[in-house]
Image (cartoon, helix red, strand yellow):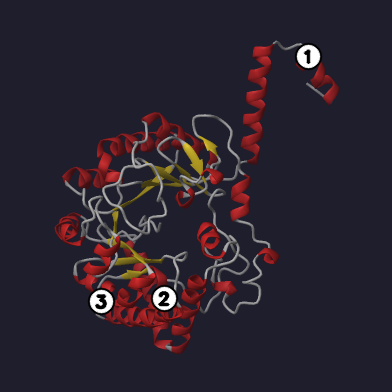
Amino acid sequence: MINNMAELDTLIATLDEKVLGEFAERLNEKLCDKQAPCIRHLDLFVTHRCNLRCDYCFLEGLQRQGDMPFEVAEAAVKLLIKLSRKHNELRVTLFGGEPLLCKDRMEEILAMAFGLCQAHGKHLNISCTTNGLMLDEQAIEISKKYGFLYLLSLDGIPSVHDRHRKTAAGEGTFDKLLEKIQFLKSHQGWLGARVTIMPDSIASLATGVRELFDLGINQFIIGLVMEAEWRPEQLRQIKEQYYEIFSFYHATLEKGLPIRISALEKNFFNPGMKDQWGCYAGSGSLAIDAFGNIYPCSRFVCKEQYRMGNIMQGSINWQFGKQISDQRPEIRWKCLHCDYKDYCSGGCYESNRIASGSPYYPSDCLCMEVQAVHEIVQENPHFQSLFTSVQESNSVADRSDDEKFRHIHAL
């Protein structure tokens, strides 16, 4: 037993250089463990390769080569299990690049991850977003074996999708996806789509939702590109388009048809985010790229200033996660006197930084979106029934094999 620093100094003086080095590594490891938050979610970049060149991709500049070695994935899952502590519900999102470019590696990683989690009494949930072009029987077998649904990246009407989601050769991809959508629908009854909206596509958002629903899409995760340059007239269209979507959503539910739209699933009359700014990136989740580099979330990958360490090289810097989740009101002065501050988390740290120059100053696009949804519900009381319908559908969906709403991941 060492009782004071003098006794510790005496002990250290007796150690040879090799043992002292091992002692320093062990001490650093213990210190890092003590500083580490509880982590329950990993984004794993199973590959950096991609068969598309989407013009809004936040991974622009990422070297489009390299698959995640098995040992990197194994180290990442072991870290997740270790840092999850007493929590038993864990999530891994298979990310890229395009994950389905390396289906064999995906399957190896999933087999390992489920085996390790089972051995430690953990329940593992899987998410996977894909552009859909590589969907085949092997991809379906993997999803069925490991119990997850694919989330498709689809941006609305064909002209919008093809404008922003091109192949490396510059070709549009919507027509190539039509056959894949029907193929996936035949195996996966519930289809979710990540719909990314740029300023030049906001005017066709509602039309895109209706047309995609007709093609078999049930769930829509709408993501406005907050850091893009939005003109005043484009910002005004957000409310117009969301009103049309609300109306379509309401009419569709009244017909008893299966649909969910993420932007409309919060009850904006019951503030549930009071003083809850920031997100859990770096403090509840991590992203690991194919080379083992650690980032707070996928949004930061390939940006050296946000790298927290390497999964194969020991210690992790946890300080950045604290910055992202910083909830001090005084650093979010734009939000302090906002009428909607209790309905909004203040936006993505990195999107805010790009749009406004400050990670704590939300973009005008985010502010307009939150305001628009809230005003639509206030001005149209009959839309309030949407929230009850969503809650009821959730309870049904959790019991249904081919309407698994859970595990659809928004990225």
Residue at image coords 28%, 62%: 154
Secondary structure under the numbered disc 1 in the rendered image: helix
* Quarter assignment of residue 181: bottom left
Amino acid marked by disc 3: Gly
- Vertically, is 18 above or below 71? above
Q: Earlier in the sequence, mark 2 or mark 3?
A: 3
Amino acid marked by disc 1: Ala
Query: In the image as oriented, which residue stretches furthest toward the front?
Result: 169
Q: Earlier in the sequence, mark 3 or mark 1?
A: 1
Looking at the image, do the residues carrying marks 2 and 3 touch, with CB atoms under 8 Å apart?
no
Question: Dot 1: few (<14), some (14–19), or many (≥20) neighbours within 10 Å?
Answer: few
Mark 2 to mark 3 CA distance (whole Å): 15 Å
Question: Dot 2: few (<14), some (14–19), or many (≥20) neighbours within 10 Å?
Answer: some
Q: How many marks?
A: 3
Q: Which residue is mark 3?
A: 256
Quadrant where the N terminus is found in the figure: top right
Mark 1 to mark 2 CA distance (whole Å): 67 Å
145 vs 12, left or right, is left
Q: Which residue is mark 2?
A: 387
In the drawing, what numbered circle is on residue 13? 1
Residue at image coords 70%, 66%: 330
